[in-house]
Every structure is written in C-alpha cells, then in structure tokens.
C-alpha cells in the first residue's frame, strides 16, 4: 500500500527553447531522490499543467516515472474541470505506471458539492489507482468542504487529500472525521508544521524543489514528535516560503530561485511572468541566508 508520509515534491517542469527539457527533468528527479524525498508529483500546478499540451502532460509523467525507476512513488497530476478529461489523464497515468493520481478540484465551472462528489466517484469507478483530492479554493474558486471530503473518504481508492484551503478549522474537521488510513497532506509549505501538529502526515511541497533535504528534515522531525527541531527548520525556511508565494504567481518564483541557484531549468510560460528585478533580488538574498548560494 502507498505510504503518504513526509515530503512530496511538486516538481517543476523545466523548459529549454520553449520545449520540455527531458534530460533536465531526469536530472531533477535524481537530485530529489538523492536528498531523501518521499515521492514526486509531476504536472501539478507547480509543473505548469495549465500551459502544457496533453502530449506534453503525458510526456512529463512518463519521464518522471522512467527517471524515478521505482525508487520513490510518483503521484501524477491528472485533474481537470472536465470529468472525462480527468478520467483519460488518470488512465494514462495508470498505463505509465504511476503509483497514485492527484486530482485538483474542478476549476472555473464551479460545480456544487454534489457535483464534486460525482466527479471524484466517477474517476474512482473508472480508474483503479489510489486517488488524492487536491483542494485549493484560491485557484479553483470552489472549496471542497470537509463534509464532501469526509463522504469521499468512504471510497476505498480515495486515500487522502492535499489541503490548501488555509482553514485550520476545516483541516481539523477532516482529520477528526476521516478514518485513520485517510491521509491529509499540506498543500502550502508554510502551513506544513501547524497542520502536522494536529495530525497531517506531510506536505506536497514547492520549496522542496530547491531545499528538499531541509523539508525532509522538518517533516521527519514532525512525524517523530520532535516539534522543537521542526519549528527551528520552519523558522529558517519561512521567509523563503512566503517569498515564493508573494513575488509572483507560483511556479514563477521557485523557478527563478532554481535558476539563481544555477539549476538552469528555464522560465515559465505565458501568461505567467518571471519575478521583476526587485523580486529576484529578495529571493537571492534568502538563498544566500540559507547557504544555498554564496553571497
């Protein structure tokens, strides 16, 4: 059974001359695994799924699975606001050998809670793979409520939720009311420590693209109940966590940070933009303070 504990990296999609850089992506997978990551999530929001073609989307999933080569679980981003499309993307992930699928709440068309339940159940009925609900109302304009997640947790193949609602009340309600084998993961780096203090098992992380070892240390400390160590790491990383969500829309800041650090993963695709010079200077300052680059 898939163990959802620790730090899972929502891996960025590297580009070279506007195309997916498969060699660089494989290099990034190795870097993550060498630093002890628990698993990888290709083509989530951080992987720029909205601007990838279907062919590119599938290529990235295939590439990450091939590069990981069974060393860590790969949880493929296969969500859509079109249920049929989500089913098809999830079926491809199964064929490619993914260990699970991450499914964003349908966005823009704003379904009701009853519609969300039918959406996820339809995917579960069609696709024999562990599924993780991704609730991020700041991007989707719809909150998948705790009542909905509790009801969906009754489905045997829906094994967890990535929670990015920002509501500790909602998160606690889910944790209290779902079975012990239903896992809640933080969808916000800065919320990881508080969420783990009440029972979440880890994070699907953005910052771990550049600081995988530190995030692994923080979640490992939290899982063993060493919250003093976890707090120290959280405090160290928190300024960069906030910058990565403030200077531009994710994943623009994390890609800028990786490029500043010499990882050469290319820019974001329009309509996203790179951070301006002031934003890049702030990111560089934090990378120096963390010892990721020299001053």
Image (cartoon, grey):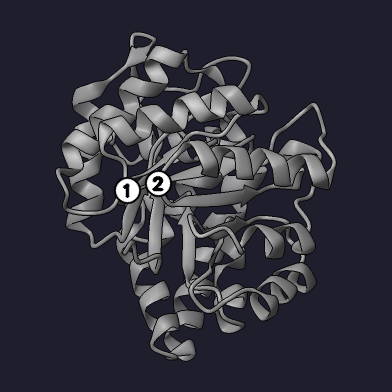
- The answer to whether 89 is drawn above or below residue 34 in the figure is above
Left or right of 214 on screen, residue 112? right
Q: Are marks 1 and 2 in contact (CB under 8 Å)?
A: yes
- The answer to whether 197 is drawn above or below residue 246 in the figure is below
10 Å crowding of disc 2: few (<14), some (14-19), many (20+): many
**Residue 103 visible in the displayed image:** yes
Give the quarter of the image for residue 270.
top right
Q: Dot 2 lies on which element?
A: loop
Residue at 31% x, 61% y is 38
Q: Dot 1 lies on which element?
A: loop
**Residue denoted by label 2:** 129
Q: How far across and how far down the image is residue 197, in percent?
A: 58, 83
Q: Nearer the viewer, residue 85 or 254?
A: 85
Q: How far across and how far down the image is residue 251, in percent?
A: 53, 35
Left or right of 45 on screen, residue 117? right
**Residue denoted by label 1:** 99
10 Å crowding of disc 1: few (<14), some (14-19), many (20+): many
């Amino acid at each position: 059974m898939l163990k959802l504990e620790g730090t899972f990296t929502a891996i960025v999609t590297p580009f070279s001359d506007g195309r997916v850089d498969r060699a660089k992506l494989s290099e990034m997978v190795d870097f993550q695994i060498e630093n002890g990551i628990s698993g990888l999530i290709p083509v989530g929001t951080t992987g720029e799924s909205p601007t990838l073609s279907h062919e590119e989307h599938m290529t990235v999933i295939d590439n990450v699975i091939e590069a990981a080569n069974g060393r860590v679980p790969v949880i493929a981003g296969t969500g859509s606001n079109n249920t049929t499309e989500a089913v098809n993307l999830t079926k491809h992930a199964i064929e490619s050998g993914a260990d699970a699928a991450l499914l964003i709440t349908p966005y823009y068309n704003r379904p009701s809670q009853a519609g969300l339940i039918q959406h996820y159940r339809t995917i579960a009925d069609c696709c024999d793979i562990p599924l993780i609900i991704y609730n991020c109302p700041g991007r989707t304009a719809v909150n998948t409520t705790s009542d909905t997640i509790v009801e969906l947790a009754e489905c045997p193949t829906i094994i967890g939720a990535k929670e990015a609602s920002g509501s500790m009340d909602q998160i606690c309600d889910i944790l209290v009311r779902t079975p012990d084998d239903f896992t809640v993961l933080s969808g916000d780096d800065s919320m990881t420590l508080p969420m783990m203090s009440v029972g979440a098992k880890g994070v699907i992380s953005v910052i771990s693209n550049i600081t995988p070892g530190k995030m692994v240390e923080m979640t490992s400390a939290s899982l063993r109940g060493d919250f003093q160590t976890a707090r120290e790491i959280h405090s160290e990383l928190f300024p960069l966590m906030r910058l990565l969500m403030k200077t531009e829309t994710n994943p623009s800041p994390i890609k800028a940070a990786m490029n500043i650090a010499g990882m050469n993963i290319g820019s974001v695709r329009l309509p996203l933009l790179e951070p301006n010079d002031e934003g890049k200077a702030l990111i560089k300052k934090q990378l120096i303070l963390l010892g990721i680059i020299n001053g």
